[in-house]
Image: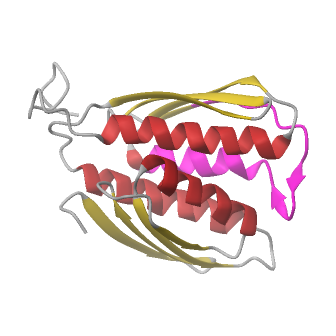
Amino acid sequence: MSNRGAKISRQTAETTIVVELDIDGSGVCEISTGVGFFDHMLSHIARHGYFNLTVQANGDLEVDAQHTVEDVGIVLGQALQEAVGDKRGIARFGLAACPMDEALVIAALDFAGRAHLSYQLSLPAPRVGQFDTELVREFFAALTANAGISLHLTQQAGVNTHHIIESAFKSFARALDQATRLDLRSEDVPSTKGRL
């Protein structure tokens, strides 16, 4: 693991989550949450963000996937926050639009230490496989709150729910990759305040 990495664990009565993240990776991932579609989306974060990512989650899936998905968002957000440290030298902002067939979602983010989620996705189907599509919002809300990221997800097009969600995750990954990259022009914190 590079010096911009983190390993975070969280255990509750509902879930046990372990996330290992290396920002300066190559897109290698090992994901196991028990929720197949969610695993697929998390792998897009690793692959398209060029992060090395391990996620091991055991949750009360006999209830539903809510606790597992939300708690993975919490722990991944905490890992991101720890991995970027004081944010010296990072680009801070990211913007990406990754089409998935007819679907297009734009992700714009600011790694500023202030959490905000603007979620403008319209998902026609309530489920993709066994995955409740309302959990997409819950995941990003938990991640942004714990990472201190301001994230705007704006859907431009799309009628297939799987495609819309996949476009959102890929765009988020690319924007996050941009925001966490080191900018060789400066080793300072990218803020007029001197801290983020």
Q: Position of residue 76 (x, y in %)?
A: 46, 59
Residue 145's place in the image compared with 178, above or below, is: below
Quadrant location of the N terminus in the rendered image: bottom left
Q: Is residue 46 left or right of residue 91?
A: right
Where residue 21 appears, as percent x and y from the top left, is: 37, 63
Image side of residue 159 versus residue 70, left or right: right
Residue at 64% from the left image edge and 68% from the top image edge:
68
In the depicted structure, whether residue 136 falls above or below residue 71: above
Quarter of the image where the C terminus is located: top left
Residue 135 shown in magenta: yes
- As drawn, the residue found furthest toward the right would be 125
Identity of the residue drawn at 80% across and 50% down: 133
Quadrant of residue 15 in the image? Answer: bottom right
* Residue 164: % across, % down: 75, 38
User: Is 90 placed above or below 28 here?
Assistant: above
Residue 177 appears at what percent x and percent y? 39, 42
Nearer to us in this view, 171 or 82: 171
How does the figure colour the protein chain or chains?
A: secondary structure
- The correct choice, above or below, for 167 with respect to 94 in the image is below
In the image, residue 7 lies in the stretch drawn in magenta? no
In the image, taking residue 131 as reference, residue 146 lies left or right, namely: left
Label tally:
0
> Which region is colored magenta?
118-146
Question: Which residue is at 71% across, 78% downward?
Answer: 60
